[in-house]
Amino acid sequence: MNNIIAAHWKSFKQKITDRTEWQVCQRHNKNRLLVLGILVFVCGIFYLWQINSLATKGYQIKELEEKVSDLKDNNKKLQVQITELRSVSRINEEVKRLNMQEVARIEYLSANGSVALNR
């Protein structure tokens, strides 16, 4: 009778141990799945953030390229305007418009000593 009780007790202990090990294994699997889920979620958020950042940077680059193009066009227009304003014909027109007289002889003064200025 003791052998039968001992065998049943051993069988009962084995079943409880197996169930406990199964429950521990299930808890470990749940924890692993939770950690994996959190990792996938964090990676997904990071991926979306990166995509959004790249899209935003793309729009900023496009705006800056348009500004560069506008500035280059404006620079070309200013260079043309500078060339026109420096032209000899333009200067001659301004001389006539301001009623300036042409100088026939130019004399330069030289100061040999100290010069006093009245300020």
Image: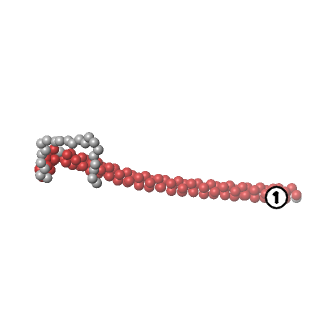
Q: Report the side of 53 relative to 108 (left or right).
A: right
* Residue 62 visible in the shown view: no
Residue 106 percent coordinates (x, y) = 16, 42
Looking at this view, is 43 or 90 the one in front? 90
Coloring applied to the structure: secondary structure
Which is more toward the observer, 35 or 87?
87
Observer-nearest of 1 and 35:
35
How many marks can you see? 1
Q: Nearer the viewer, residue 3 or 22?
A: 22
Relative side of 114 to 43, left or right: left
Q: Secondary structure at mark 1?
A: helix
**Residue shown at 63% from the left, 57% from the top:** 30
Q: Residue at x 17, y 41 (%)?
A: 107
Quarter of the rendering containing residue 7: bottom right
Q: Residue at x 12, y 45 (%)?
A: 102
Name the spot of residue 61 as percent of width and height, x first: 37, 51
Q: Is residue 86 visible?
A: yes
Residue labelled with disc 1: 9
Q: Amino acid at mark 1?
A: Trp
